């Protein structure tokens, strides 16, 4: 994440514990529900959620993960997310500047969720981030990206470019959901559909 954007985010989270109204907007609740429903497995062993913000999606993912590492580059956001997940033994929240601090030392992940993150990166850092995903995704791993489509002042990359960098990894795509507001994509090393995984077809 570009360092010149850090003061913006620190001020944002210092002014409000929920600056995007993640807890109250139906738009946000519905988007989370769609993302969770699009995951091809009921449960994951080790997941990573960079750009976790105040931890609203983190709380939902925690119910489906044995171990979940969440991170944000804003210390204020990290503090809020830590407080909100303090009662969950399977969740750890860290401060990461990406792609520099990608947690390679944590091992490999069978779920990586990039939600509303990539468009804050420049072109080179987004491609580095995509490479980090590829390098640390387990043999049965799932990669998710969900991003706002309209333009806004703090955007560095288009959502199309963000998803293009991830699609270029060549992983089979399991799901694509597009609306005027956002796009959600799910890729996996195992290209079988949910029905195929369960022997229905």
Image: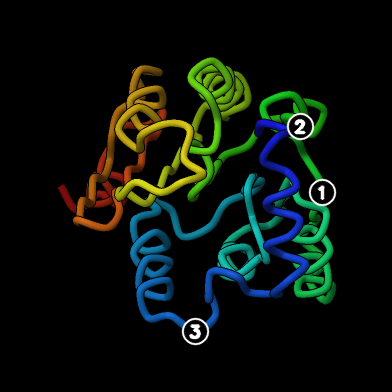
> Which of these two is toward me, 45 or 154?
154
> Which of these two is toward me, 145 or 159?
159
Residue, disc 1: 94
Identify the mark nearer the N-term, 3 or 2.
3
Q: Nearer the viewer, mark 1 or mark 2?
A: 1
Query: Please, what secondary structure does the residue beneath circle 1 have?
Result: strand
Residue extending furthest toward the bottom: 24
> Which of these two is toward me, 187 or 93?
93
Q: CA distance from mark 1 to mark 2?
A: 10 Å
Asked if 19 appears above or below 123 in the picture, the reply is: below
Q: CA distance from mark 1 to mark 3?
A: 25 Å
Q: Give neighbour class at mark 3: few <14, some 14-19, many 20+ (Cα, 10 Å).
A: few
Q: Which residue is drawn at the image coordinates 32% and 43% (left, top)?
A: 185
Q: Which residue is drawn at the image coordinates 63% and 25% (left, top)?
A: 136
Residue, disc 2: 103
Q: Can you give x and y, in whole percent of width and height, for residue 58 in the image? A: 63, 63
Residue, disc 3: 24
Q: Nearer the viewer, mark 1 or mark 3?
A: 3
């Amino acid at each position: 994440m570009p360092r010149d954007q850090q003061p913006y985010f620190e001020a944002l989270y210092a002014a409000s514990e929920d600056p995007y109204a993640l807890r109250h907007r139906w738009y946000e609740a519905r988007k989370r529900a769609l993302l969770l429903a699009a995951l091809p497995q009921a449960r994951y062993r080790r997941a990573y959620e960079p750009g976790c913000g105040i931890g609203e999606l983190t709380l939902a993912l925690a119910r489906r993960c044995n171990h979940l590492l969440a991170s944000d580059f804003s210390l204020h956001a990290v503090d809020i997310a830590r407080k909100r997940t303090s009662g969950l033994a399977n969740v750890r929240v860290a401060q990461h500047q990406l792609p520099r601090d990608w947690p390679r030392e944590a091992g490999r992940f069978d779920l990586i969720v990039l939600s509303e993150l990539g468009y804050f990166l420049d072109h080179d850092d987004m491609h580095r981030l995509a490479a980090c995903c590829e390098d640390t995704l387990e043999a049965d791993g799932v990669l998710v990206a969900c991003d706002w489509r309209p333009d806004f002042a703090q955007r560095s990359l288009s959502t199309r470019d963000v998803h293009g960098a991830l699609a270029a990894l060549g992983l089979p795509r399991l799901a694509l959901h597009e609306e005027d507001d956002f796009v959600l994509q799910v890729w996996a090393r195992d290209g079988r559909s949910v029905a195929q995984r369960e022997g229905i077809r």
